[in-house]
């Protein structure tokens, strides 16, 4: 601030000295002196924010112009061909550039201070609020349907067994619902072979006893085989 104050007194540049309360002026205060909680900024705040924004844009343009001019003058000074007037402009441009940098830095600091003050106020307001009473724990409840079902089927596990494995096997064996697992197929084949042999023996016995019905059936079958060759009956779709 001392640097800006001296530059302002010597009229080295046209600018307004920043005040300490530039960014912390509240719209209205409550009865105890603290800023009142509002839903949005007041009209004076909006005007002040617009003016600050316009001033910031103007300072940015001036700074860019100063840096461009300073770059041109610096080349002349560094080359050693600058006279006293050019050298004087070089130092004045340097001072004005640092004035613009200081104003931007002070504005940023004031904004950070305002943010920190608001955060501190929010924390204090939250600490002053009364603590909510602890809610009593909820008691567990059981539906009537679930309670009845638990009595029938058990408390979280299936019902107990009503018969042993042997009883189940005997019951299904009586119903004939058991698969043929473990039953050897040789017994079934032997039974089929015995039935065919028995049938052949009955035929031979009837032929030996000159059974008319058996002889007539055999004779008709022999005549049929003589008049019909093998595969003669079904010739459909065969060339």
Image (tube, helix red, strand yellow):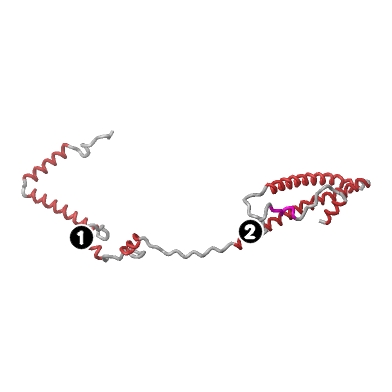
Viewer-proximal residue, 168 or 61?
61
Q: Position of residue 11 (x, y in %)?
A: 87, 49
Where residue 27 is drawn, which disc sits there? Answer: none
Q: Which residue is mark 1?
A: 174
Secondary structure of the residue carrying tag 1 is helix
Q: Quarter-wise, where is residue 233 in the image?
A: top left
Viewer-proximal residue, 95 or 191?
95
Residue 50 highlighted magenta (yes or no) = no
Q: Which quadrant would the C terminus be assigned to in this image? A: top left
Q: Is residue 124 left or right of residue 181?
A: right
Q: Is residue 120 left or right of residue 215?
A: right
For label 2, the crowd category at 10 Å Cα-Cα, with few meaning under 14, some 14 to 19 and many 20 or more, is: few
Farthest residue to the top: give it.
239
Q: Which quadrant would the N terminus be assigned to in this image? A: bottom right
Q: Position of residue 102 (x, y in %)?
A: 79, 53
Q: CA distance from mark 1 to mark 2?
A: 85 Å
Magenta residues span 21-26
Viewer-proximal residue, 194 or 105?
105
Viewer-proximal residue, 94 or 187?
94
Q: Is residue 164 left or right of residue 87?
A: left
Residue drawn where x is 75% and y is 47% of the image = 56
Q: Which residue is mark 2?
A: 122
For label 1, the crowd category at 10 Å Cα-Cα, with few meaning under 14, some 14 to 19 and many 20 or more, is: few
């Amino acid at each position: 601030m001392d640097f800006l104050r001296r530059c302002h007194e010597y009229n080295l540049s046209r600018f307004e000295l920043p005040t300490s309360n530039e960014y912390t002026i509240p719209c209205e205060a409550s009865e105890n002196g603290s800023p009142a909680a509002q839903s949005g900024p007041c009209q004076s705040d909006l005007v002040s924010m617009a003016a600050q924004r316009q001033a910031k844009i103007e300072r940015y343009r001036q700074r860019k112009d100063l840096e461009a001019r300073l770059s041109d003058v610096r080349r002349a000074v560094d080359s050693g061909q600058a006279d006293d007037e050019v050298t004087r402009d070089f130092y004045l441009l340097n001072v004005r550039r640092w004035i613009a940098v200081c104003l931007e830095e002070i504005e940023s600091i004031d904004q950070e201070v305002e943010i920190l003050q608001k955060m501190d106020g929010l924390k204090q307001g939250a600490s002053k609020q009364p603590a909510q009473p602890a809610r009593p724990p909820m008691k567990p409840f059981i539906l009537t349907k679930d309670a009845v079902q638990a009595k029938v089927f058990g408390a979280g596990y299936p019902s107990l067994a009503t018969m042993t494995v042997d009883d189940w096997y005997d019951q299904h064996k009586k119903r004939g619902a058991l698969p043929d697992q473990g039953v050897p197929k040789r017994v079934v084949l032997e039974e089929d072979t015995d039935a065919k042999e028995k049938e052949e023996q009955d035929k031979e016995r009837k032929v030996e006893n000159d059974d008319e019905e058996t002889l007539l059936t055999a004779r008709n079958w022999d005549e049929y085989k003589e008049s019909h060759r093998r595969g003669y009956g079904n010739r459909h779709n065969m060339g």
